[in-house]
Image (cartoon, rainbow, N blue to C red):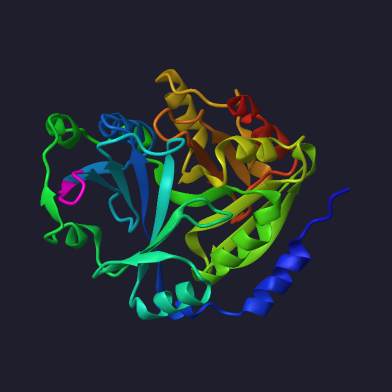
């Protein structure tokens, strides 16, 4: 029987202490996707069908002629950047980077050097190489994204169908979809401790707790930055019978899904099903009396990422209803084939 590593991770948290980045850290700034040529606009429209994020502008990077689209959600600090490259991206489509807002880059630079993590530097940002155990890169920025794109490195870009993007009105049926509740990684068993260390050293997030999913031979680690959203979670499988193990064996460590917190999730899901959206289970997972209702969409064809809708009740801060979380996790197994 596999033993939870919760106690071990608690010891690691205490051993590491507060990250030097903690003093300059100001939360998630953006998430960045890299998509194939011609995929950006369909991907943005898909985001508009699932969330309230809206197209806010596009820019061409002079150096490589890639196009960067910015999506924003009113009254929310986290932007979405969709980078469309002139050539096919390497590997499976995916979220490529998490960007964090910081007040100063010196403390970040010091930690990256101490951890021997390769990074590139610009006048307003540091960007790491893909991180072992997590699969994506971290970037640290001191500017807001529109200021970022106002540099000489970028020029304004108007897509051929920009009118379609700009004239899209917010879908009233999505008014209860709020911001990102949590970001969920899948990682390898032999890289669990490394992933935990990097999350705690390279951000102000701290290990909080573990959730064991016996029915899927897996465990999920939870990291929090105080009471701020989003939380970071990372799941790993114990053996080859685990859907998490098989997912990582095929796709590598990476972000598996983004969860959006929703008011009145039952009404939203009913509308989305009528609109043709597909989910990995027919019924909601969880129970309002136990604090949570949640459901997964099928993976996006543009990012191979799942969208989760989640509603919480009575101040519940967890991520699973322990009665049937194995069903939720197991519902993604067919996508590992």
| Residue 296 image offset from top left, x and y in percent | 55, 33
In the picture shown, does residue 112 fall above or below 166? Answer: below
Based on the displayed image, in which of its 4 quarters is residue 206 positioned?
Answer: bottom right
Q: Is residue 100 left or right of residue 63?
A: right
Based on the displayed image, in which of its 4 quarters is residue 198 positioned?
Answer: bottom right
Q: Residue furthest right?
A: 1
**Residue at 25% over, 37% down:** 86
- Is 64 contained in the magenta span? yes
- Is 176 contained in the magenta span? no
| Residue 250 image offset from top left, x and y in percent | 60, 35
**Front one among 132 and 243:** 132
**Residue at 29% over, 44% down:** 83
Count of residue discs? 0
Q: Is residue 144 left or right of residue 286?
A: left
Q: Is residue 11 left or right of residue 262?
A: right
Question: If the image is split into quadrants, where does the C terminus sit?
Answer: top right
**Front one among 177 and 239:** 239
**Residue at 40% over, 47% down:** 178
Residue stretch in magenta: 59-65
| Residue 92 image offset from top left, x and y in percent | 46, 35
| Residue 47 image offset from top left, x and y in percent | 35, 36
**Front one among 59 and 87:** 87
Q: Is residue 219 left or right of residue 313?
A: right
**Residue at 33% over, 78% down:** 104
């Amino acid at each position: 029987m596999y033993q939870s590593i919760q106690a071990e991770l608690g010891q690691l948290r205490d051993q590491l202490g507060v990250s030097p980045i903690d003093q300059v850290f100001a939360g998630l700034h953006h998430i960045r996707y890299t998509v194939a040529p011609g995929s950006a606009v369909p991907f943005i429209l898909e985001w508009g069908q699932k969330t309230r994020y809206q197209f806010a502008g596009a820019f061409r990077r002079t150096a490589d002629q890639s196009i960067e689209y910015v999506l924003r959600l009113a009254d929310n600090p986290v932007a979405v950047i969709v980078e469309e490259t002139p050539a096919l991206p390497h590997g499976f489509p995916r979220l490529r980077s998490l960007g964090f807002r910081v007040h100063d880059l010196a403390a970040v630079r010091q930690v990256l050097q101490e951890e021997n993590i390769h990074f590139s530097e610009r006048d307003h940002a540091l960007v790491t190489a893909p991180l072992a155990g997590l699969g994506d890169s971290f970037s640290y920025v001191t500017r807001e994204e529109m200021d970022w794109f106002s540099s000489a490195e970028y020029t304004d870009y108007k897509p051929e169908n920009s009118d379609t993007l700009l004239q899209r009105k917010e879908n009233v049926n999505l008014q209860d979809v709020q911001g990102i509740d949590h970001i969920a990684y899948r990682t390898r068993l032999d890289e669990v401790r490394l992933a935990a260390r990097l999350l705690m050293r390279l951000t102000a997030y701290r290990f909080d707790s573990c959730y064991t999913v016996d029915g899927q031979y897996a465990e999920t680690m939870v990291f929090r930055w105080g009471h701020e959203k989003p939380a970071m979670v990372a799941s790993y499988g114990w053996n080859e019978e685990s859907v998490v193990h098989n997912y990582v064996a095929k796709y590598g460590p990476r972000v598996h899904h983004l969860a959006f917190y929703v008011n009145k999730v039952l009404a939203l899901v009913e509308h989305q099903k009528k609109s043709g959206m597909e989910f990995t289970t027919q019924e909601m997972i969880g129970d309002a009396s136990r604090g949570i209702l949640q459901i997964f969409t099928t993976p996006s064809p543009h990012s191979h990422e799942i969208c989760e809708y989640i509603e919480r009740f009575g101040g519940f801060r967890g991520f699973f209803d322990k009665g049937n979380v194995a069903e939720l996790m197991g519902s993604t197994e067919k996508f590992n084939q």
